[in-house]
Image (spheres, rainbow, N blue to C red):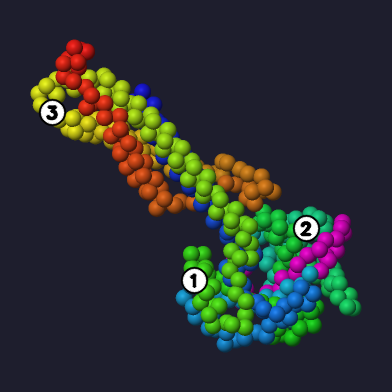
Amino acid sequence: MVRLAVLSIALAVAVIELSQAFVQGFETEIQNKVIGFGSHIQIGSYFSLAEEEIPLTYDTAFVEQVDTIPAVAAIAPYVTEVGVMVGPVSQTGVVLKGVDKRYDWSFFANALQEGELPNLDEDKVSLEILISRKQAQTLGLKVGDKSKIFFLKDPPRRRPVKVIGIYETGMEEFDLNIVMCDMRLVQKIRRWRNNQVSAYEVNLHSLETLEETANEIDAFSVEYEVLPITDLYPEIFDWLGLQHQNVTFIMILMITVAIINMSSVVLILIIDRTPTIGVLKALGLRNSRLQSLFVFNAFFLILAGVALGNILGLGLIWMQDQFGIVRLDQANYFVDVVPVAWVWGKFLWVNVAVIGICTLFMLIPTIVIGRITPITAIRFE
C-alpha cells in the first residue's frame, strides 16, 4: 500500500508536468506561427473600405518613433493584393503579401522546405515568390517553375512570377492563401507610388508586452488603427487559453487521487501501530505529538514520490523534445509533433504544491489518533 501511494504521488507529478510542458509548448508553437504571418501588432488606416483599400503614405518620423520603444524589435511596411494564381494543374485564389528588405524573414526561413527566400536587395523589382506546399500541390508547381497571377482589376492585369521557394507551417488557413513577394511588385499592380503601403507590421521582443506596447503606440498615432494580434485572431488565442483549463482539471484530479491514496496509507499505519500509540499515550505523549509523527512519516513518503515523479516526468519530456515520439495530425492540430516547453517555474510550483497540499491533508486521517484510548489500544495488542 505504501508503494502504491508513493507511485500515485509520482504519477501525479509526472502527469501534471507533462500536461504543462505539452500545453505550453503547443501554445507557444501556435502563437509563433500566427505571429510569424501577422506580427505582434499591425498598424493600418482607419479609412480603408471593403471595396477599396486606401494606402498609407510611408511616415519616416512615425516609424522611427515606434522603433525607439524598448519592447519593439522591428517595424516594417507591407502591401497586400488579392489575385488568382494559375498553374499547370489548376488555379487558386491567393493573397499576395509584398514586403521590402527590412522585413524579418526568420519565421519563413524556419518554415522553408525547398528552394530559398526571395531576393529583395536588387534595384529592380523582383518577380520571385515564396508559396506554401499546399499551394504548390494544388497548382502543380515546384521550385524554379514560372507561373502567372491574374488580378481582377479594371482593367484586369496579370504578372509573370517565378517560384523561388516553398514553405510549410501547418496553419492551413494561412498556407492556402499567403504568397510572399517583393513589395514593389504589388505596388505596381495597385498603381501605387513607392512610398504608399497597406500597413505596418510591428514585431516585439516578447508577447508579454503586447497590450502595453499597443497602447503606447496608439497614444501617439491618432490617425492610425493599432491592432494587436490577439484582436486580429481572437478565436485562435481564445482556443489556446482554453487549453490551460484542461491542465487545471488534470492537476486537481491527480492531486485528489494522490491525497486519497496517502490518506489510506496513514490510516493503515495508524491501525498497524495502534498498540504502540496506546503505550505512548499511557506514558503521557500528547495527541498532537503523535499526529505530527505520522504526518512527518507521510511527508518523507510524499518527498520520495515527488522525486520519482520528477525523474519520470522530466525524462519523458526530454525524450519527446529530443526524439518527437508523440506525433499529431497536422491538418487538425497545426503541428506534426507534440511540442514541449521547459517551464521550470511551473515545474517548481507543481513540486511545492503537491508536497504542501498532500502533507497538509495528512492531518485529516491522523484525527483518529485522538479517539484511541490507551486501555483499548493495549487490549487490541
Dot 3 and dot 1 residues touching (CB under 8 Å): no
Residue under label 3, please give it: 285
**Residue 109 visible, this angle:** no
Left or right: residue 66 versus residue 10 is right
Magenta part of the protein: which range? 83-107
Q: Amino acid at mark 1?
A: Glu
Q: Position of residue 163 (x, y in %)?
A: 77, 65
Q: Position of residue 58 (x, y in %)?
A: 65, 84
Identify the mark nearer the N-term, 3 or 1.
1
Q: Position of residue 109 (x, y in %)?
A: 62, 63
Q: Position of residue 314 (x, y in %)?
A: 43, 43
Identify the mark nearer the N-term, 2 or 1.
2
* Residue sitting at x 59%, y 64%: 230
Q: Is residue 279 above or below residue 299?
A: above
Dot 3 and dot 2 residues touching (CB under 8 Å): no
Label 2 secondary element: helix
**What crowding class fits label 3: few (fewer than 14 Cα within 10 Å), some (14-19), or many (20 or more)?**
few
| Disc 2 to disc 1, C-alpha distance | 40 Å
Q: Amino acid at mark 2?
A: Ala
Left or right: residue 379 versus residue 55 is left
